Image (cartoon, helix red, strand yellow):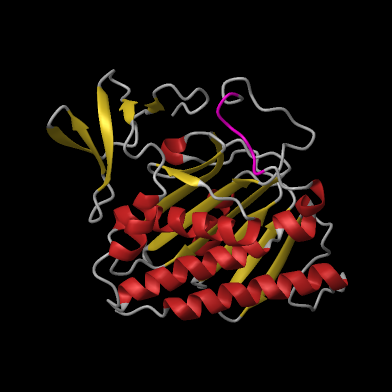
Amino acid sequence: MKFPFAEYCECYKELLLQFANAVQTGATSATADVSTSFTADAVICRRAAGCLEYWQNLDSTQYRVKEAANAAAENINLIIARRQEKGRGRYGRHFFSPLGGLYFSFILPPGKLPLALYTPLLATALSESLASVCQRNCRIKWVNDLYWQKKKVAGIITEFVASKQPQIVCGIGVNWCAPLNASLPPEIAGRVGNLALPLANANLQKAYLSDLQSELLLEFFTKLQQYEEQRIDAAGDFMELYEAKLLGKGEQVLLSDGREVLLQGVDHNDGSLLVYQGKKQLKINSGEVSLRLDGNEGVNW
C-alpha cells in the first residue's frame, strides 16, 4: 500500500498554522476548532484528518500520542508540550524536559523504509532544520542525539507500535535555552547543554510553537517521500548526510567494554556503527554501546 506522505506533511502544517492563529488571536470558543483557551492545561486543534494537542504540562508526548492514536480513527496526531514530567528516551530512560525546551511527538504509518533507518532520517532532518531555522550546526551522536559545542542539545526516539493499525511514533526534544526555574540533575550536568538561543525566542510563540516544527516535518516527509518513490538510490541521500554529520567520525573512540576503536562511519542499509579494531572492521548495532571521544572532555556517551 502506498501512503501519501506529502499529504501527511501538509496536514501537520495546517494543524500547526491553525494552532498558531488561535494563539495569536486568543479567540477560542466551545464551538471552535480549538477547544480551549491557550492558557488552559491543553489546547486541542482538530481537522478532518487529524488532531494537534498542546499541553502546558504533560507526562510524556510519546505516551500521549500513542493514547490518542488508539482512542480515535485519525492517522494524524501531533502532541506538543511546554514541559514533560516523564519525558521518554530510548530503552525507557528518562529525558529531562524542563521549561525552556521544545518537546513534541507525531505519528505516521510505516512505509518501505527499513525500521532501523527512521531514527537516522529524523536525526538528519532535525540537524538540517536547526541549521536553517536556528543557525546552529549540530553534529549527530550515533544513533539518536544531537550535539552542539560538545554538549547534547537534542534527543530523538522512534518506536514501532504494532496494533490493528501499525504506526511509527516519533518523538523530539530540543534544549532551546537554559532550563527555566530548574537546574540540570548532577548526573547529566556535565554532558547536557542548550542551543543558547535568546530568551525572547523561547516564549510560547517561538520555542513551544516554532518554525522548527514545520521545517522539521517538511525535511522529514520530503526525504521519506523521495525514498518511497525510489527517486534516490536506497537510503543513500539522507544516510550520506547523516554520516557527514556524525560526531567522532575518523576519531579514536572507546567502547563501553574498554576497547579502543576507530570510528569509520555507518552502514547505510541498517544504520549500524562501523568501527575498526586494528585492521578488523566491526559492526556495532546495540544502543547500549557507550562512546567517549578520547581527549575531548564533556563528550561522554
> In this view of the protein, which residue sits in the foreground, 54 or 248?
248
Left or right, residue 114 beside residue 124: left
Residue 238 showing in the rendered view: yes
Q: Give the residue displayed 87% in from the left and 74% down from the top.
A: 27
Q: Position of residue 160 (x, y in %)?
A: 37, 55
User: Where's the N terminus, which quadrant?
Assistant: bottom left
User: Where's the C terminus, which quadrant?
Assistant: top left
Q: Give the residue displayed 71% in from the left and 75% down from the top.
A: 18
Residues drawn in magenta: 190-195
Residue 162 showing in the rendered view: no
Q: Position of residue 122 (x, y in %)?
A: 44, 57
Q: Give the residue displayed 51% in from the left and 59% down from the top.
A: 128
Left or right, residue 11 beside residue 207: left
Q: Main secondary structure of the magenta part?
A: loop
Q: Where is residue 141, by image quadrant?
A: top left
Is the residue 211 above or below the residue 231 in the image? above
Q: Position of residue 229 (x, y in %)?
A: 31, 79
> In this view of the protein, which residue sits in the foreground, 283 or 286?
283
Q: Position of residue 10 (x, y in %)?
A: 55, 79
